[in-house]
Structure formats: C-alpha cells, structure tokens
Amino acid sequence: MLYWAGDPIAVPAFRMFAIVDGDLHSKKNVVGTRSIYKKFEERFGKAATWASYNFPGHRGKYKKTTPKLLDEGNAFLNGNTTQYGEGIRRYGEAFEGYPHPGIPFFGVEQRTYVHYLELAIPYDYPELVEFADLITAELMKMSVICGAMGMGFFLPYHSDSLGHQLGQAVPRYRAILDVTPNMVTDGIRKEGSSYRWQAGEEPGIADIGWRTLIGHEFWSRIPEAVSALKAEKDITVEQSDTVLAITAGKRPVWGDVNRKEDISAYRAVARQLAPIRYPQGAAKAFMFGGGTYDPDIADKIEAYLGRFS
C-alpha cells in the first residue's frame, strides 16, 4: 500500500497498460478491446462493483453497477465513434479500509491520436500469468505503440493529482511498474507531443516491465536486440505483424530487495532495449508530476529510470 499524509492512496496490483494508435473504435483495435473487456468481465465482473463512464449521458461520476449501467457500457464499446476523453472504467473495492474504488480495474479512454487501455488485478491472483497471456494475445493483433505489464501500485483515476507519490517504493521494489499512460504519452512520439524536444532526442517506449510491448515503429532502432534477447536465459520473445512482446521470467516479481528477488532477466531486457528507452528529458518533465526543479521528485525519477541498472 502507498500512503500520503497518512492516508492510503494506491493499492498493490498486477498492472497492464497499452498506448494504442488511433481511435479505439477503429477496425484494427475495437475487436481486441471488446474481447479484452469481455475477458475482464468473465473473470472479475462480479468484483468490479463500480463504474465511471464518460460518453453522452454520463460525465465520469462513480456509480454502483447495475445491469442497465453495464448494458450502457457495452453499448459504448459496440458503437462506432469516439470523441476525445470518452471511455469507460470499471472498479472493484480493493479491500476493507481502502476508501476508494480500486481493483480489479478495467479502463479504456480516447485521447488525441491514441487511446489508453489499462487493467489492474490482484497481484496474488492464482491464474495471473494465464490471464496476462490472454490479454497479450489480443494486444498482439492491435495497433499498440507500446505498453507494459508488471507488479506495481494502482492509483484510481480520481486521485490522478497524487501521481507525484507513485514511484516512492522503488528503493525496495526494483521491478516495480509505476508510471501511468498519461505520464508517458508525450515521450513516445513527437507527433502531438507537448514536450520541447532537444537536438538528438528520440521518442522511447513507455517503460520496461515483466512483459514489455513494443510497436513496429521502434523496431528499426533495435535490429540486433530480438536475437540477443532470444539467446538470454529466462526471456521469452513473441512477435506479431504489429507488436513485439518480451517477457522477463516465468512469473512477474516485485524485485523485493529485502527478499533478494532476482531481477537479472529484467535487467537484460532493459540493457538490450537501451536504444529505445524512454527519453530522460521527457521523464523529468512528465513522470510523477514532473518536477525538474524539485530535487526530491527529480531524484525519484532518476531512481525509477535507473532501477534496472
């Protein structure tokens, strides 16, 4: 659990996110999104007792789920048009004592040029790897720019202003996945980015996780990485026409320093993907609330980016 001012703000979870090119209702993406949502509902729907929708007739307020509300969410996904900011979110109640909607979580949201797809489930879910494989199989068919899966802390969207508190657990949990899609979007492409790119800077993938998803637009910058990673112990490489999926180990770990958890596979992935790692300038501008001029946040960003060094 993560705390701020003595209050719990984020819960431990297995997190999955992808930043996907284009409209979520585009032919290339919508079939996969609907399938992922269906799989979430089949496994976790009964536990996800809250919904927050943002499309005509809904303005993002949290509501207890009802059959009618769920039907409206399905109708949105089964539609064919999306405006900026529209999407659906489904939340569970993480556990007693946590005062916010939490996990299990499913969310999809349209942004400019891209859309976000994010899930968070209990980190001790017995069939975690199997479920992650099912989600990955769908993402491999979509126009994924980049994404990642791994252990981390889930911060509900209504607490987004507390994003500066994420990343605080890095000193103990070295394999943590703690960025959110909206923290990293401006550094993955120059198109539509609000970042002031410096000479020689190139976009990079959002993060490194237990499983790292890399869209084809990055492949030309890592021509030897795929072969090298295939030769690495405990690393699995899958590739479709649009997405490269690199998995570090059979199961995700926290990289708990106190338990001396081995993260050598994560480090090998990070080393081979160095040419397309997230740009440091953009990280200082946007990760964990930015804070280039705040030494505490700047130090935390550096620690996060260097956690596999």
Image (cartoon, helix red, strand yellow):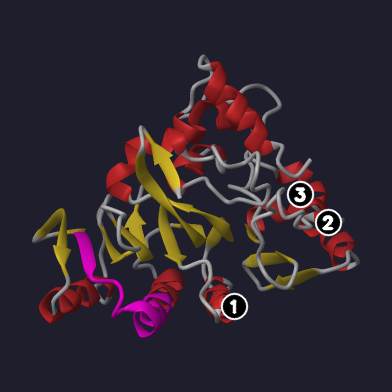
Q: What separation in Å lies between label 1 and label 2 (alpha carbons)? A: 22 Å
Q: Residue at position x 26%, y 52% from top? A: 99
Residue stretch rendered in magenta on the structure: 35-53
Which residue is most to the bottom?
A: 42
Q: Is residue 145 left or right of residue 201?
A: left
Residue 64 horizontal/vertical position (percent): 15, 67
Q: Which amino acid type is marked by label 3?
A: Ala
Q: Is residue 50 magenta?
A: yes
Whether residues under marks 1 and 2 lie with C-beta atoms below 8 angstroms apart, the answer is: no
Residue at label 3?
Answer: 270
Residue at label 1?
Answer: 133
Q: What separation in Å lies between label 3 and label 1 (alpha carbons)? A: 21 Å
Q: Residue at position x 45%, y 76% from top? A: 32
Residue at label 2?
Answer: 225
Q: In the picture shown, does residue 309 fall above or below 32?
A: above
In depth, the one of 209 and 162 nearer the eye is 162
Q: Is residue 39 magenta?
A: yes
Mark 1 secondary-structure assignment: helix
Q: In the picture shown, does residue 87 fall above or below 29?
A: above
Q: Which amino acid type is marked by label 2?
A: Ala
- Mark closer to the chain start, 2 or 3: 2
Q: Is residue 40 left or right of residue 50?
A: right
Mark 2 secondary-structure assignment: helix
Residue 113 makes an appearance in the image: no
In the picture, residue 127 is in which quadrant?
A: bottom right
